[in-house]
Amino acid sequence: MGMWGASAGRFPPISWDPMDNGREGVGLDPTMDLLARHVLEFETRLGPGGSVRAFFSPGRVNLMGAHLDYNGGLVMPTAIDRGTFLALRARPDRRVRLLSTLGGDCVEFELDDLPPKRVGQWFDYPVGVLQALGGSARSRGMGFDVLFGGNLPVAAGLSSSASINVGLAMALDGLWGLDRGPEGVVRTALEAERSYVGVQCGIMDPYAVGLAKPGHLLCLDCSDASYEHLPFDSERLVIAVADTGVRRELAQSAFNERVEQCARAFGILGPLCPGAEVLCDVPLEVLDGVEGDLDPVLGRRARHVIEETERTKRARLGLREGRVDELGRGMFAAHRSLRDLYEVSVPELDTLVSVAESTEGVLGSRLTGAGFGGCAVFLLERDAAPELEARLRSTFGGHYGREPEIHLFGGDPGPREVSLA
Ligand code: GLA
């Protein structure tokens, strides 16, 4: 739920051309070229010289386990080959300079004198990472200049904030020799968002970005952060995302309201289930037994969470046994539940998902991210991509008089330094 997204900035968005779909790599791996241009941009804005290092940190889509992370459940995200670019140069002193291709002035401060409070601007995220790294890491470290940019669609529910935080935490881990490893980097990124930026987000996003493995979904248990990587056939199947272009102003408060409703529901249901520590632990029979006495809104929220937990477990079992269709069916069912029980969909998302349901070769589709606008995600046979794109454009265009932005994503190996030599 970041308020700032790394966007294409001055780079043209790379959108999916279905005619390229069959050709190896075309339109799917633009990262190197864009990163090289990003480094040139750094030198233009911050001056030449020294060694400028380039880093990439992906975004993510979540396929199953919608709104389960803050309820202590299972989620199944995967990283995508779009994300945040960082061009970074170490400095001989303790100054830090932060710049973004999205505009705004350069933000400067001393490493020993961080801005004390968030100000509601994009640089809250990197400052939050510096804060979360802790005083002893900062005292071991050195100053640096960094330019952020990227090619993630902005504010589309693809986790730009986790992408930025994990990217910077990983880059500084290397630069300062902290050696905290991928899970340490993920924890720093999470802490930055929760403490300094002040968003009570679930743990899914930084884990999805930081522990990515190509050709796999990350199956993360948000009650204890244990995880496994589940393979899916990324030769035959692809992930697409269509952006409705709808951005709900009240999305953050509506999200917080869902978090609070789930906490209230667990406050009532938890004591009825010995051993249950989170709402996802509550058995459906317990809810069935008391739903009539519950506030109907809390009943609907709890039903979504408990049934989505079951669907996600079935999808996990399916993937372990090589049955990806279970995941696809679960995605369609999840969307209906997000629409009717959790009430976080909008008509534009419902239109996209219903087109997917009637398109051959599409295994599953649902809204991704928090909802309230943003994107729908599709799991489909690679060959079905051109037909799906045409149908999405014409049906959505017929209803709303404009076309959704459509992207076809490849998987991603996760945050890394990229050698441009
Ligand atoms: C947003 C949050 C995630 C998760 C999803 C809903 O994207 O950032 O942590 O709660 O909503 O599944």
Image (spheres, rainbow, N blue to C red):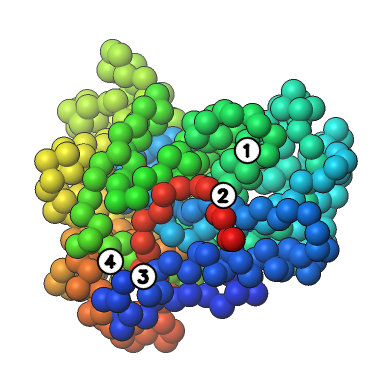
| Residue 29 percent coordinates (x, y) | 43, 67
**Location of residue 295 by image quarter:** top left
Residue nearest the viewer, comparing 312 with 167: 167
* Between discs 1 and 2, the one toward the N terminus: 1
For the point 30% across and 58% down, the residue is 366
Q: Marks 3/1: CA distance?
A: 29 Å
Three-letter amino acid code at disc 1?
Answer: Gly
Residue with the mark numbered 3:
25
How crowded pointer 3 is (Cα within 10 Å; few <14, some 14-19, many 20+) is rated as: few
Secondary structure under tag 2 reads: strand
Drawn side of residue 405 relative to residue 99, left or right: left
Relative to 418, residue 375 above or below: below
Q: Nearer the viewer, mark 1 or mark 4?
A: 1
Q: Nearer the viewer, mark 4 or mark 2?
A: 2
Residue with the mark numbered 1:
174
Residue with the mark numbered 4:
353
For the point 41% across and 49% down, the residue is 413
Q: Is residue 237 visible?
A: yes
